[in-house]
Image (cartoon, helix red, strand yellow):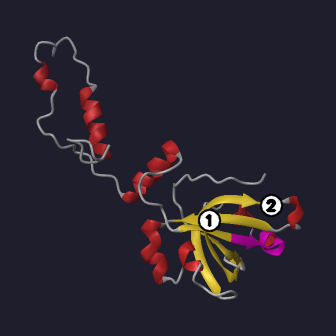
Amino acid sequence: MNWIEGIHHRRDALWQVECAGKLEGPLLRQDNASLREETETSPLQQMSIEERLVEDYAGTGLTVDKHPMYHRRPELRRQGIRSAEELRHRRDGEFVRVAGCVIARQRPGTAKGFIFISMEDETGIANVIVTPDLYDRDRLVVTRSRFLLVEGPLQNQDNVIHVKATRLTALSDRALEVRSHDFH
């Protein structure tokens, strides 16, 4: 709705819908001009990026805006946290830090307790291997976090890239309701 003529932002659209939906009572039937707003602009403030993302994910499970990690990338870059794309250019065995939105958690019965997490950022997908010991130590972080910071050695063999997690940290996602495909 942000790009429709006469609508400057989402809350402006809500304001216009509310004004258009006002019912005329018996006193105003003769003079419906009094129902019209004198100003075209809404008194409501424009949503912040975070508010838009929260509402997008709450309403549809996705956003047409940039990926949530895109908005945090400058801060992450200052902390030495790599994007999924940057992992492709790192050498096997290098210690890396990567962050993303958890999109899948897998715990195959044949994997001897290992868990595989797929995280997405604005550049692609990063795959993470969680050992049984780390899972036992950080079970809630592994199973409940929507956004994760993963630290560990990179496994880059024949362009198959994984991070073998040695440390997991839940990133603050405030109210962002993203959903992942998980084992149960």
Residue at numbered disc 1? 119
- Region rendered in magenta: 128-135
Where residue 43 appears, as percent x and y from the top left, is: 22, 45
Q: Closer to the camera, 23 or 130?
A: 130
Residue at left 51%, top 55%? 175
Query: From mark 1 to mark 2, how far is it between C-alphas?
Result: 15 Å
Q: Relative to residue 114, is residue 45 depicted above or below?
A: above
Where residue 122 appears, as percent x and y from the top left, is: 49, 66
Amino acid at dot 1: Met
Where residue 2 appears, as percent x and y from the top left, is: 30, 47
For residue 107, the mark is: 2
Whether residue 171 is visible: no
**Position of 32 compared to 117: left or right?**
left
Can you tell which quarter of the image residue 118 is in?
A: bottom right
Q: Relative to residue 87, is residue 71 depicted above or below?
A: above
- First reached walking from the N terminus: tag 1 or tag 2: 2
Residue at left 29%, top 52%? 46
Residue at left 45%, top 48%? 55
Residue 130 lies in the magenta stretch: yes
